[in-house]
Image (spheres, coloured by chain):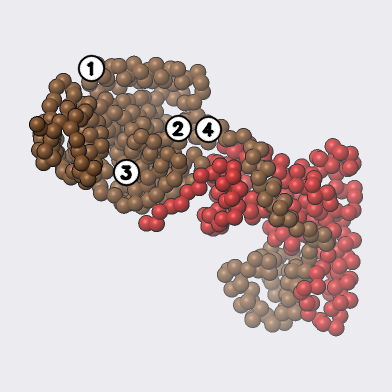
Chain colours: A red, B brown
Amino acid sequence: MKPQKKENLSPTNLVLSLKQNDSLLQFENKTDEEVWSAFDKGNELAFNYIYRIHVKSMFRYGSQITCDTGLIQDCVQNIFIQLRDKRGSLSTVQNIKGYLFKSLQREIIRKLKKDSKLGKDGLDQNDNYFPITLSHESVLIHRERDEECRQKIKKALTELTTRQRQAILLLYEEGLSYREIADTMEFSEVKSARKIIYRGLATLKDILQK
Amino acid sequence: MKYKDYDIIDFLLEEFFIQWVKNPDKNTRHFWEKWLQQHPEKRDMVLEAASIIRSVKYANSPELSDEMYVESFENIIKAGHPIPERKLKNKSWFSFYPLKNIAAILIFGFCGWMVHSHMIVGVQPEVPVEKEEITVRRTVPLGKRSIITLADSSRVFLNSGSEMEYPKSFNQGDRWVRLKGEAFFEVKKNGSSFSVFAKNTEIKVLGTSFNVKEADKDLSVALVSGKVQVNDQKGNQVRLNPAEMLAIKEDGKFSKTSFDSLEVTGWKDRILVFRSASFREVKRKIENWYGVEVSSNGKVSREWKYSGIYKEETLENVLRGIFITSGMQYHIENRKVTLYNPK
């Protein structure tokens, strides 16, 4: 029966609590739905946990849409401030990362449009978003054609459409499932997520099946 | 199509395979390692697919700086409005809070108090709060104890000077009571949870027996059987096991200890228990138990402690038992007890 430590959760202590691991210990084995529901009920450790786990990937995700880091930071903050204000009446969320990505993308696009840095049609018009690459770190199997092959795949990937690149990055880099990708990219059907990735990968077929 | 008929694109599209590459767990690891052993001809293809999956990266991947990480967190915390209390409660509780109802509750509560203190009979004023939710408020005057059976046949022992509000029927499925003072709960299991709200704290249980005591500015929850979860307003959660007691201080600090069950819950069986109690504790317990006022003209040494157990004893017998050994005398007049040192 060890005594439980409890924080006095004033703003200062909340900030200090970023350096402690209480939230990780309490929530790392919980499902996203449980974490989200705790957050909705006002649990500050749950918020702390969500922030820790997701804010870095949110920032990185935002960087795929704009290189204005100040704007990304603003948007990330706005999202969390709004969510905290709505605690007590938040809807359930099964995949927190996907949900935050979707919110962030909407927020960034809204802001860019407001500042007239983006046309009405949003991202699809422009091809600079979600730049993709193939890293060196893993070695392909057929060593002799390694580098050549890698360059070809990389080129093919960069020639994909923005949405295809985005979906492939969500699948491989972020490790989201098709369902989560569909949620994040606001497809009404899960199979649309699979389809967009299939179309993207099909262009690699010739290179890969040599 | 079976995995052995897959080509590289199929593997690149297969969620279960990507899972193994990106976030291997016991399940995926076991399967794919075994599968590879059984299909060595697919090994190159599988490893190439895995290699591609691992190599796909953002071309542009800036890191959030540590300063921004902390600064954003601070901005978020400070920008927020405190969460409205009502939003965090469940619906039936929510209906308690709107301002227009508060006056009604206070007036009825006051009337209830008047009736009690004048008649000293177990009267139960009913407080209609709004149409859908009829709640009952019960107060127990000093010197009295009361047993209440709730709509779900859970039993509540309400200690002297305590007050409880609860819905007359738990028709929406959620069972709750609001407590001021001390009560012992014997909650019947019926599938839905049962919440005790005391001092901005929610004590949530399924079926169990436990004691809740709100004294001065502190709150304690002692669990006799079953399981309870305590949620405070700051979102902290503590689970208790049988024979554990949680004490929450005014400043929110809490600690878990074991407890003497007779000392903590004896009151419900009309047993008055002192366990090395200080003079102040003894005085307060007697005042609560018998509904009297105790004043002292004498001197009591700081080290003075008293232990004793009384079952359904009169005030006179208890006073005699306690103070005879301490060399003090007592005098009872009306509902006032005076203690003094003999000349």
Chain letter, disc 4 residue: B
Q: Residue at x 90, y 53 (%)?
A: A127
Are circles 4 and 2 on residues that touch, CB within 8 Å?
A: no
Label 1: few (<14), some or many (≥20) within 10 Å?
few
Q: Amino acid at mark 4?
A: Glu
Q: Quadrant of residue A81?
A: top right
Which residue in the structure is indicated by mark 2? B172
Chain letter, disc 1 residue: B
Label 3: few (<14), some or many (≥20) within 10 Å?
many
Are circles 3 and 1 on residues that touch, CB within 8 Å?
A: no
Q: Secondary structure at mark 1?
A: helix
Do callouts 4 and 2 point to residues on the same chain?
A: yes
Q: Amino acid at mark 3?
A: Phe
Chain letter, disc 2 residue: B
Q: Secondary structure at mark 4?
A: helix
Of pointers 1 and 4, the one earlier in the residue sequence: 4
Which residue in the structure is indicated by mark 1? B119
Do callouts 1 and 2 point to residues on the same chain?
A: yes
Q: Amino acid at mark 2?
A: Gln
Is A46 left or right of B224, judged from the image as shown? right
Which residue in the structure is indicated by mark 4? B85
Mark 1 → mark 2, Cα distance in angstroms: 35 Å
Which residue in the structure is indicated by mark 3? B210
Mark 3 → mark 4, Cα distance in angstroms: 26 Å
Q: Residue at x 35, y 29 (%)?
A: B164
**A22 vs A113, nearest the viewer:** A22
Q: Quadrant of residue B181?
A: top left
- Marking on residue A63: none
Is B247 left or right of A201, judged from the image as shown? left
Q: Secondary structure at mark 2?
A: loop
Are circles 1 and 2 on residues that touch, CB within 8 Å?
A: no
